[in-house]
Amino acid sequence: MATSNVRFLIVKPENGGIWDLVRFLVQGDNQSRAKFLEYSDVLFEEEPELQRDGDDYSGGGGSEDDGNHRWVIFVSILVRKILKLFAKPMEWTGYFFEFFLNIFSHNGSFLGLLYNILHGKLVLPKRGTETFISSIGHVDGRTNLYKAEILTKEIDRPDFVLGMGHRALMDLCMMASKLAYENENVVRNVVNHHWKMHFVDFYNCWNDYEKESSTQVFILCDKPKDAKLILISFRGTEPFDADDWITDFDYSWYEIPKLGKVHMGFLEALGLGNRGNTSTFHEQLVKNGKSIDSENVDATIARSEQPRERTAYYTVRSKLKSLLKDNENANFVVTGHSLGGALAILFPSMLVMHEESAVMKRLSGVYTYGQPRIGNRQLGKFMEAHLEHPVPKYFRVVYSNDLVPRLPYDDKTFLYKHFGICLYYNSLYIEQKVHEEPNRNFFGLRFVLPVYLNAGWEFIRSFTLGYVYGSEYKESWESVLLRMVGLVFPGISAHSPVDYINSVRLGRERSIHMSSF
């Protein structure tokens, strides 16, 4: 593939002001559009709608479609501008909020904190230690797996096979997805001492576009030697990280020949390019990935002590190959919540593209929770051909009105599409196997009232779950506070890991076969 023939679209909020954005929404002229949209010459030549003004912008869809398309871009750019404006306040709010959550927990509640201050026994939390818990960990404090002994016994059986929709495995994956938000020492402690498994490694990987190590991932095995299960868990969207939310609301894409259009921000999170120089995508996706010397590419990046050279895809691929070689009976699973879910399904997609057939033969499943869309229909068809035969291996779990799985928009402008088996849980934790979650773009007018009524129900329910299902389902005050936020922004509170863990453990009326606990 010649780099001159690449196709891409980059949405660039930073290139224009609010009035430029308003003019783009109202008029859709070339001048305002050029400020916010950058696209390849090939795309410009092949897509006449990019060359037209006003009502012809949709490429034949008429003025109504044109207005809808501009509205989608307008909302995306406006949200990203607001997030960028409040990036530092969000960062500092998160920093102090986590500190106060931990100082309370370290000193045994607010009264305990006052007592320790008065008696000179104040315990100060220290970031990076095994006792410093993230805000996500405070929202849902559950650590132990649900009836883990069942999964342990099954893994030890000589004929162990990870079947479709394995319920105990789903719980392990969701708990690992939540655990990925923690620091390395917390992850190691939970995996080794609570789950009685083997912690392998934790990586902070470089994102060249963001110019920081913003992609976290950890790996575990069921045991140190002769492992049968290897699990890879990518960290999701940090609640107070504006860059993570900006990535979720980004609509930029890069087209990979034969594979399809892929979300550019997720490729960058895996370390597979930088939109500042789009030729880097070709270099990372094609040149390095399919190089006959790819083993050396993996090893060089994985061993590098320079943070800017350690990228998620090559680092994890190198370690995975090593683990599979050392554990001949092992298969692997990939998981993640939110942004982590997007990376979890994109990782095997890149393995397929790079013709890593020996590795892919040992993939048991991909389980994602609250995952945003990662590409177009062509990408979905390509991956379904590799993940649905002989048995389905990709399961996408969606809870009720979670906003994130409805991003980026599935419409005629960007053509983002979900694929794989969707396990949808409503607010009663009733499971349905569906092709697409209801209200697929979230902002449909007919769903506004039901969404807010449902948020009210979830707030009331937060006070009753512990009485109905037992103490482990009692919600923390942090979770109740998030439910209150959900009364204003319902799609955000529904993204909480609390409901995803509850969905897996309490889900009923299953429409696909689930192995029993």
Image: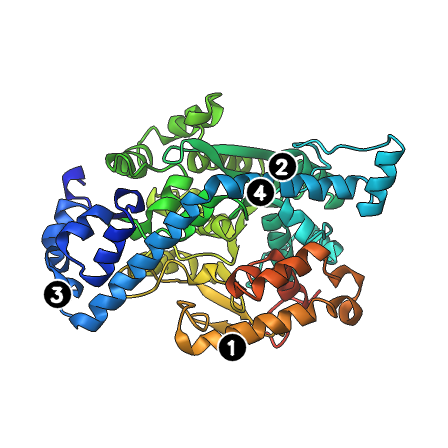
User: Which residue is rendered at x = 69% and y = 32% of the image?
Assistant: 129
The residue most toward the top is 305
Task: Give the number of the disc on residue 322.
Answer: none
User: Tag 1, which secondary structure?
Assistant: helix
User: Which residue is rendered at x = 28% and y = 35% of the image?
Assistant: 276
Q: Earlier in the sequence, mark 2 or mark 4?
A: 4
- From the image, tell me which residue sits under label 2: 183
Tell me the CA gap for discs 2 and 4.
Answer: 19 Å
Disc 1, disc 4: CB below 8 Å? Answer: no
Check disc 3 and give the amino acid type.
Answer: Asp
User: Tag 2, which secondary structure?
Assistant: loop
Check disc 4 and give the amino acid type.
Answer: Thr
Q: Nearer the viewer, mark 2 or mark 1?
A: 1
321 to 6, vertically: above or below: above
Task: Give the number of the disc on residue 450.
Answer: 1
Q: Nearer the viewer, mark 2 or mark 4?
A: 4
Looking at this view, is 420 or 58 the one in front?
Answer: 58
Q: Earlier in the sequence, mark 3 or mark 4?
A: 3
- From the image, tell me which residue sits under label 3: 56
Residue 375: name its quadrant. bottom left
Residue 258 left/right relative to 164: left
Q: Position of residue 273 (x, y in %)?
A: 33, 37
- From the image, tell me which residue sits under label 4: 93
241 to 153, vertically: above or below: above
Q: Nearer the viewer, mark 2 or mark 3?
A: 3
Q: Residues within 10 Å of mark 3 (few under 14, many from 20)?
A: some
